[in-house]
Amino acid sequence: MVRAGGGLDAHGTPQRFVFFHVSNLRLAEAFKIKTKTIRPSLTMAQWTHMSQMLPHLTNETINNLYPPTAFPIEVRHFLAQWIEGQRWDDFALENVEQKNQAQALLDQTISMLQSIAQQTTNVVDKMKLMQFSKNMNIFQAQPLQFGVMVRDILNQERGLLDTPQFQPFPNIESSFPNMQDLDCLVLKVLEVQNIRQKMHQMQEELNWERQNYERAIQPNGLDPTLSESQKLQNHIQQLEYNVQAMAKKRFQLLKECVDCLDQCQTRLIGSLKAWRWGQHKATIGLPFDDNLNTLQTWCEQLLGVNGKLRQELVLLGEPMPELQERLGKLLQVLIQSSLLVDKQPPQVIKTQSKFSTTVRYLLGEKVAPGKPVLLKAQIINEIQARNLGGVPSDNVGELINNTAILEHNTSSKSTCATFRNMSIKKIKRADRKGSESVTEEKFALLFSTEITITGCDTPYRIQMISLPVVVIVHGSQDNNALATIIWDCAFSEPDRVPFLVPERVPWRMMYSTLNSKFTSEVMTEHNLDQYNQHFLAQKIFDKPDFSDDFSNILVSWAQFNKEVLPGRPFTFWQWFEGVMELTKKHLKEYWSEGLIFGFIGKQHLHLILKDRPNGTFLLRFSDSEIGGITIAYVSASENGGQKIQNIQPFTKRDLEIRCLGDRIRDISHITYLYPDFPKHDVFKKYFTEPQPSPVGGTLLKINTSSSSLDAVKPSQCWWLLWVSVTST
């Protein structure tokens, strides 16, 4: 169950929380959510990092870290900010004097959970949170155990975060040249300029003193005393020494400046790669900040420093080939790395269909004035993408409207070229290997131009390729093409050879991808839970009886979207994508409220419903039909016992005719949403008002018998008949 609700932090400040409804086992992926608080200055750094790591941990590890009956992961999430603001490290079982302190923290924990529960209007959330607070009472007899437990949990988290294999990919912020780096670089450049000016003054003074000395020793000049002559010579020698020392310091500082510039630019290039990597991962729903303004500022500042250092080398008066060559290479790399695809083209492109894309140049304000800069786009295949030494000679496709002018926007301070109404007229495909389909072949758009930067004598050729795209000719290929893109974005490595991907990946990575894509596509904060995860694994591996952890079992591309599921005419991805599309268009609110159980196998379904009273039901996605949701419910059997039945799935077409809430209301023999929530309490807000009867008519609702529900299409189960009534 996911809902936004209010709460109080440790200081009594109102706060937004995100609530979850998950069952006994806690699943890491259920907590990959960003929460917003009214006090953004307060952070929960450790939990933020842990939530990013959790999808890569096994269920066993998570349950050991957060004991479900004592300190479930939900409590860690709800109270993360407060927990990390308290002192837990000092607690020890032998320190009995800390009992009162531990008791106070225990009471606060229970009180805050109850407060959050009271302020949420959802009955499921309320009951779940109240149960958490009740469970905490087991520590009332020995509160020190509570304090030590939380201490150990936090310490174990820190240990996991320090493990090398769990270090996250570098993000933009961590790879930025920090302010101290740039300040240090700028100060060094200023010092070089100051030394140059001082050397100029000292050289002028030295020249003046030399002239004075030469005039003094001329035959017709004044005859200086020996002491005065020696004094003048000593002064000249001191000036010469100072100038030499200053020159040496100047050269050393110049070298340090170039070294520092190299380091800053290396980190900047790393952050540009991190930005592109984040853009790549956004395809599968991972959060991504596409703002390029900070990166642009760094590019411009480093370009300025490079120009000043090159100027200092010119003013040096003597050749410094090593430093000049290094600065020239740094300049070239910076100019060529500042071209980015700001708005990527669609990653599945249908021929003859129009699309747009935008390329941004981060050094746009430094482009030399004059002739407009014209960018050209062309489509390239995988082999050409691996050999980008220049402009590919072989044309593998024809692009319409494939040129755009680089234009500067003064209000946004961005320089972009927008390709509008672009389309692929035709495409030349490579020879396919084995059973490879056209929807598995990847292309990319290559953007290139020649550009001149103010202060640089020669023009530079710059280019950048887009993310991989799949070209299709018919809409029916869209689903399979999207599967290729999902696999590429989820499992490719940074700095890979285009466009290599692994053939197999661990299930934990696959599940994390499915969860991210599902939540982003549906636009919900309610993640798939551990029951969903286990059933999805059982389905893709065709192991319905397997009850162990699937996390490290390898899943192949063929299992994902090449081989059809056993007994079905569709692949795993085609089935999953159908459910995702149905939820996005018709079930978003139901899913976000936690009213849909989701992906669950029939064996597990019978296990959890077998002891429930007649009329108990849950909503599950159909595993036999693409894009269907069904109602599983407990009913009386012919021999007086119980049986579990499944209504034929509702599809997109059914829900367009009549919404899910109204269909649930219409079925009189389903009464309680699992485990025991009255359906009218949880679904009433989804009920629509009955349509008024037409003039001269009466609305009659006829129910079919419950025994025929399994064989009848749900849209056919309840007819609305208009029967003409005449007055007598």
Image (tube, helix red, strand yellow):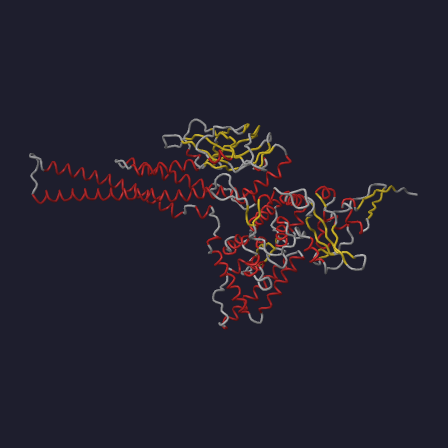
| Location of residue 485 in the rendering, given as x and y in whole percent from the top left corner | 56, 40
Q: Looking at the image, which residue sits at the far right?
A: 728
| Location of residue 394 in the rendering, given as x and y in whole percent from the top left corner | 49, 28
Q: Nearer the viewer, residue 313 or 118?
A: 313
- In the figure, is residue 351 to the left or right of 367? right
| Location of residue 525 in the rendering, given as x and y in whole percent from the top left corner | 60, 50
Res 641 quadrant in image: bottom right
- In the figure, is residue 263 to the left or right of 127? left
Q: Nearer the viewer, residue 693 or 479?
A: 479
Position of the N terminus, as image quadrant, is bottom right
Position of the C terminus, as image quadrant, is top right
- In the figure, is residue 425 to the left or right of 267? right
**How many numbered circles are shown?**
0
Q: Is residue 599 above or below residue 458?
A: below
Q: Is residue 386 above or below residue 526?
A: above
Q: Looking at the image, which residue sits at the far top?
A: 371
| Location of residue 552 in the rendering, given as x and y in whole percent from the top left corner | 55, 52
Please tell me which residue is depicted at 56% across the width and 34% down the height of the picture.
Answer: 432
Please tell me which residue is depicted at 29% across the width and 42% down the height of the picture.
Answer: 194
